[in-house]
Image: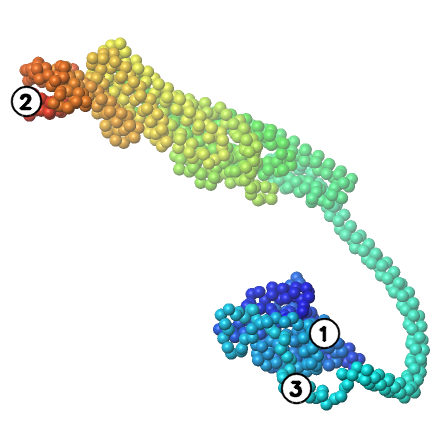
Amino acid sequence: MMNSGAGDEEVVKAAEMALHDSKEKVVLAVKVSKSRGIWGVSGRLARHMTKPRVIALTTRSSDTGQRVKADLHVLKHTSGGALQAAKVYKLRHLVKVEVIPSDVTGCTFVLGFDNLKSQTVSPPQWTMRNINDRNRLLVCILNMCKEIIGRPPKVVGMDVVEMALWAQANTKTVPVKTIARDSPMEDGDRPSELKVTVEQDLVSQAEEDDMEALLGTYVLGIDEAEAFSERLKRELLALEAANVYAILESEPLVEEVLQSLESAMVCVEDMDEWLSIFNVKLRHMREDIESIESRNNKMEMQSVNNKALIEELNKLLERLHIPPEYASLLTGGPFDEARMLQNVEACDWLAGALRALMPPSLDSNYANMRAVREKRAELENLKSTFVRRASEFLRNYFASLVDFMISDKTYFSQKGQLKRPDHADLRYKCRTYARMLQHLKSLDKSCLGSLRKAYCHSLNLLLRREAREFANELRASTKASRSSTVWLEGSSGSNSVTNADTSTVSEAYGRMLTIFIPLLVDESSFFASFMCFEVLPLIPPGGPSSAGMEGSNDDENDDDLGLMDLDGNDIKPNQNSMELEALNEALQELLDGIQDDFYAVVDWAYKIDPLRCISMHGITERYFSGQKADAAGFVRQLLGDLQTRITTQFNRFVDEACHQIERNDRNVRQVGVLSYIPRFATLAGRMEEYIQGQSRELVDQAYTKFVGTMFTTLERIAQIDPKHADIVLLENYAAFQNSLYEQANMVPTLAKFYHQASEAYEQACTRYINSIINYQFEKLFQFAQKVENLMYTITPEEVPFQLGLSKMDLRKTLKSSLSGVEKSLQAMYKRMQKNLTSEELLPSLWDKCKADFLDKYESFEGMIAKCYPNETLSPTFAEMKDLFNTI
C-alpha cells in the first residue's frame, strides 16, 4: 500500500459518503483538476474551464459473486461542499494512459477508453497536484488492471523504470491474496476486502533481461566513482563550450533585436504622453456631464413633486368641501317621511366625510393641518346638531304613535270581541327611520340610550294595555263551572266528585300564550334589530316561536329588518356578553308588567279547576322549549315564571288534598275501605287526562306525595285499633290495587306504588291468617314448633324423652286441640266472615288460610311419624283436607 497523508484519508471518507448507496469499496481517492486544453508555443498550458474533481478507484463484486469488477468514478463538489457522483468508467475498457509531454511538470495525463461514444471530442485532461499524487494514482490503476482484468493498459510519455523505482520507495508491503479472473472466490473473501499489491514489477522478466543486456553494452564506469566523475566533468565542460559558441554566433541578431526594441520604446513613450493628455480632457468632460445630469434630475424631481402636491391638495380640498344642500338638511331640514331619503344621503356623506378626515384614511401629516382641524371641528358641530335634532324627533315620534293607538279603542279587545294585537302599521312607520337610527349609532352611539328608553316606555304602555284588555275579555267570555276542591275529604257524606268540563280554562290559557308569546318574541326581535343591538337574531328563520302555533300571523314576522352596517353588508354575530346584557335590560323595561295579566289568567284557571294546572304546565313547557334557542331573555324569563307559578298553585292543591287525607277521623275507629282510596283513583284518572307534553314529572311528583300521605295515614289509622289493624290494612291495600289496576299498567309511577301496596297487602294477610289459625290451634302448632327447635340439636328418637314433649304430652295436646275439629274449622270461617267488611275478599282469604293451615298440618304429621313412630294423628292430613272442603 502506498503512503498517504491525513488529507487523503479525508478525501477517501468523503468519496465513501458519496458512494454509500452502492456496493462500491473505495480503494483510492485523489483530488484532480479537469480541463480540456491545448499546449501553446510558450510552453504554458492554456486551460479552459478548469474544474476541481476527485477520482476514486473502487472495486465491487459481480451479481453472481464470482468475480471482482473495478471502476473509476469521477466525483464533483455540490453547492454545500459535499461530493456527488458525476461519471463512472469501467477499468476493463481502459486501453491507454498518456502523460502530456508538453507539461513540464509531468502532472497532466489523459485516460483513453475504447468504449467512448464520441471519439471526435477530445478526452478530458486530468492534472494532479504533484508528481507523487500522479504516480500513486497511475501505479494503483496499473496494478488493479493487472490483478483484476489481467492486462495492463498502454503507457505513453512516462518512464516505466522511474515508476517502478518510485513504487518501491513509496509502497508499504501488505500481503494480500490475488484472485484469478475466472476462479470463484473463497467463502471468507469478500470483494470489498480487495487490496491491490504494488510489489509486482511494472515490466515482465523478459523485458527486464533485455534492458540489462542493453545497459551492459554501454561502459559507463559507474563502478569506478572517480573515473565516472571525471567523465561527467568533461562532458559538462564540452556542453558549456557549445552553449557559449552558440551565443556568440547569434550576437548580430541580438543587436538588431535590441535596436528594434529601443525604437518601439520611444513610440510607446510618445503614445503614453498623448494618452495622458486625452485622459485629462475626458475627465473634465465627464465631470461637466455629471453636473449637467444632476441639475437635470433635480429639476425633473421637483416638477414631479409639484405635480403630485397639486393633486393631493385638490383631493384634500374635495374632502374639505361641504355641500350646501347637505349642510342645510343636517342643521334644519325636516324629518318627515318624504324627506327621509335626502336625510339618509346627508348622513352617508357626513359619516364618510368624518372618516375621510381621520387616519388611516387621511395621512397623519395632513391630520394636524389647521385647515383640516377647523373643517373637522365644523363637521363635528354638524354631527352634534343633527344627532340632537334627530333624537328629539324620534322620542316625540314614538310617543305620538303609541298615544294615537291607545286613544283608539278599536285597537283593543272589547266586550264580546277578542282583538288580536296588530303592530304591523306601527312597525312599518318605525322602519321608515331604521336607516337613520343606524347612522345615529355610527355618528354617536351614546344617543341610542335615550332613544331606547323612550321606545321601551312608549311601547310598554301599549303592550300592557293590550294584554290587560285581552285577559279581561278572555276570562269574561270563557264559560266553565267551578269544580269541587274537596277531592279527598274523608268526612264528606257523598263519595262522588263533580266531573265538570273545565277544558275551556286551559284552552283560554293556551290562547293567551298563542297570541302574546309570538307577539312578545317578535317585538323583542324587532326592538333588537331596530335599535341596532349587535347580537344574534332573536328569531331564527322558521323558528318555533311563530311556526306551528295556533293563530300565528305571518305578516307580523315579515319585518325584513336585519342587522346591517352602513355599506349594506350583514354584521357578523357578536357574542359580546355586555351587549346581550344591555339588550336584556332594555327588554325588561320594554315588557315589564305584562306578566301580571298572565298571572291573573293562571290564578283564575286555578280557582275554577286546580287540576287544569297540569295542562297549563304542559302548554307552557311547549312554548318554553321553543324559546330556548332564542336570545329574547325576557320571554324565556316570563315562561319560566309562569311555570313556577303554575307549579306553585298545583303544589298548593296537592298540599290541601294531603291535608284532607290527614284530617280523616284520627281518634275514631275506622272500618272498611277509607273514602280517599277510591277517590284517589278518580283523581288520578282526571290527572292523566290533563297531562300534556312535559307535565309528566309534575304529575308524578304529585302522585308520590299523595300516595305517601295515603299510606302513612292508613298505617296511623290502623294503629288506633291494633286488634283489627291487619284487617284495615289488607282491605284498604286491596281496594287501592283494585281501583288503580288499569292505570298502574300505563303509568310507571303508579305501577311502583301498586307493587308497594301489593307487598303490604301480602304482609297484612299473612299476619291476619296466622292470628285466625292460632286462635283455634295455637297449642297444637306451638307443640310442633318446640319439637322442630329441638331437632336442630338432638335426634328424633330422643325427643319423646324431653320435658314437656313426652308421648303423654303429645296425646293431651292432640286431644285438646283436635277434639271437635269440625266445629273449630267452622268457627275459623265465621270469625273471618265477621271481621271482614269487604265480602269480595273473603273467598281469597279463606283459600289462603286453608292452604297455610294444611301446610302446617302436613308438616306436623310428618314430625309425629319421625319422632313418635307409634303414635297416629287423627284426623290425618287427607281427612283434614276433606273436612275443609265441606266448609
Rendered position, 458 above or below 838: below
Q: Which amino acid, mark 3?
A: Asp
Q: Earlier in the sequence, mark 2 or mark 3?
A: 3
Alpha carbon of mark 2 to alpha carbon of mark 3: how far? 147 Å
- Disc 3 + disc 1, Cβ < 8 Å: no
> How many marks do you count on the picture?
3
Alpha-carbon neighbours of circle 1 within 10 Å: few (<14), some, or many (≥20)? some
Q: Residue at x 30, y 28 (%)?
A: 749
Q: CA distance from mark 2 to mark 1?
A: 139 Å
* Quadrant occupied by the N terminus: bottom right
Is residue 718 rendered to the left or right of residue 250?
A: left
Q: Distance from label 3 to label 1 (Cα)?
A: 28 Å
Q: Earlier in the sequence, mark 3 or mark 1?
A: 1
Q: Nearer the viewer, residue 351 or 787?
A: 787
226 over 396 or under it: above or below? below
Residue at image point 40% right, 29% down: 620
Q: What label does residue 870 carry, if any? A: 2
Identify the mark at residue 209; answer none if there is no mark: 3
Say which residue label 1 marks. Answer: 131
Instruction: Kindly identify the residue that appears in the image at 46 percent across and 32 percent down.
Output: 519
Which amino acid, by three-letter code, is at mark 2? Asn
- Secondary structure under tag 3 reads helix
Of the pair 853 and 300, the residue shown nearer to us: 853
Foreground pick, 804 / 301:
804
